[in-house]
Image (cartoon, grey):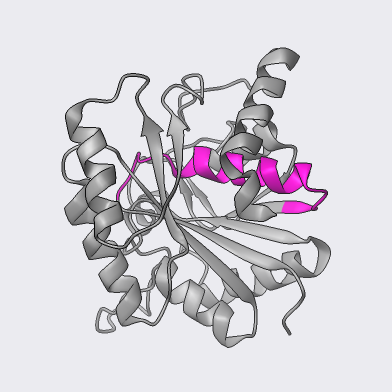
Amino acid sequence: MSSSAVIYHIVGTDTDVGKTLATACLASALEQAGKRVAIYKPAQTGVGPGQPGDADFAAYLSGARAFEGSRASRPLAPVAAARLDGFTLPSLQKHAERIGLLSADYDAVIVEGSGGVTVDMAEGEPGSTYRPYNHAHLIELLTQAGHRAKTFLVARSGLGTLNHCQLTVSYLSQLNLPVEGLIIGSWPAQPSYIEESNVCALTEMGYRVLARIPAGLGRGFSAGESHDLLWPDAALEDFRVTAQQLFGALVA
């Protein structure tokens, strides 16, 4: 059964493009708007027991609550990581059910994918013909169940991003899944001609560049490598001020 909660999907053109920081900024802006926010990571990889994962980090920065669908220790795509750790990933239906339950308790649920949008977060029966089970298909399931969805695409700023953005948006469009706009996951303090040119080109192509997250905003966090989340209160406050400036208009 659907709810009044909005489900925000953070999808990426690739890995390490800034999805977790985009998730944290969006969650922080929603929290500051008085919303109760849950962050759900269907498939966390490369993180051991007790270590903070992407959802934990985003929740720490924003004040939201973190949830994971699965966790594997190897820094690989979810299917390969789960196989090496000896377990089977939850099905897309299980993820959809979990997100549905969260949407009953929270005003907003942010779902952060793994890697690029076509990376599988579930797999079929052993021996069956391959078919994709990725974040786009999870969005489809949730939409069919009546949930309100907004999808944001996170991309890098440098060379290659024009191709990656067009391919990703084209893939989502084939599934009739609209994208609200693009977020640059790490924008340098002194952007080069390449970065500035990319933003101009994306705008000319008809894409909405909604936000540019300043490089270094995450203060060096890396899932699987960072063990403690101990920012000074002033640094957390600075982050939340920046998040509001960047994403406040998106949640108004």
Q: Is residue 219 left or right of residue 115?
A: right
- Residue sitting at 42 percent across and 63 percent down? 121
Inspect the magenta stretch and tell me whether residue 240 lies in it: no
Inspect the magenta stretch and tell me whether residue 29 lies in it: yes
Q: Is residue 6 left or right of residue 81?
A: right
Q: Is residue 47 left or right of residue 37?
A: left
Tell me residue 37's x, y (percent).
74, 52
Tell me residue 18's x, y (percent).
42, 39
Q: Which quadrant of the figure contains the C terminus?
A: bottom right
Q: Say which of 37 and 87 sits in front.
A: 37
State the extent of the magenta-drawn residues as a range: 14-37
Task: From this view, report whether residue 150 is shown above or below residue 174.
Answer: above
- Residue 35 seen in the figure: yes
Q: Say which of 81 and 41 sits in front.
A: 41
- Residue 87 seen in the figure: no
Q: Which quadrant of the figure contains the N terminus?
A: bottom right
Tell me residue 140's x, y (percent).
48, 80
Task: From this view, report whether residue 99 is shown above or below residue 242.
Answer: below
- Residue sitting at 22 percent across and 25 percent down? 192
Q: Say which of 84 and 214 sits in front.
A: 214
Task: From this view, report whether residue 197 is shown above or below residue 128.
Answer: above
Q: How many marks?
A: 0
- Residue sitting at 69 percent across and 37 percent down? 62
Tell me residue 178's x, y (percent).
43, 73
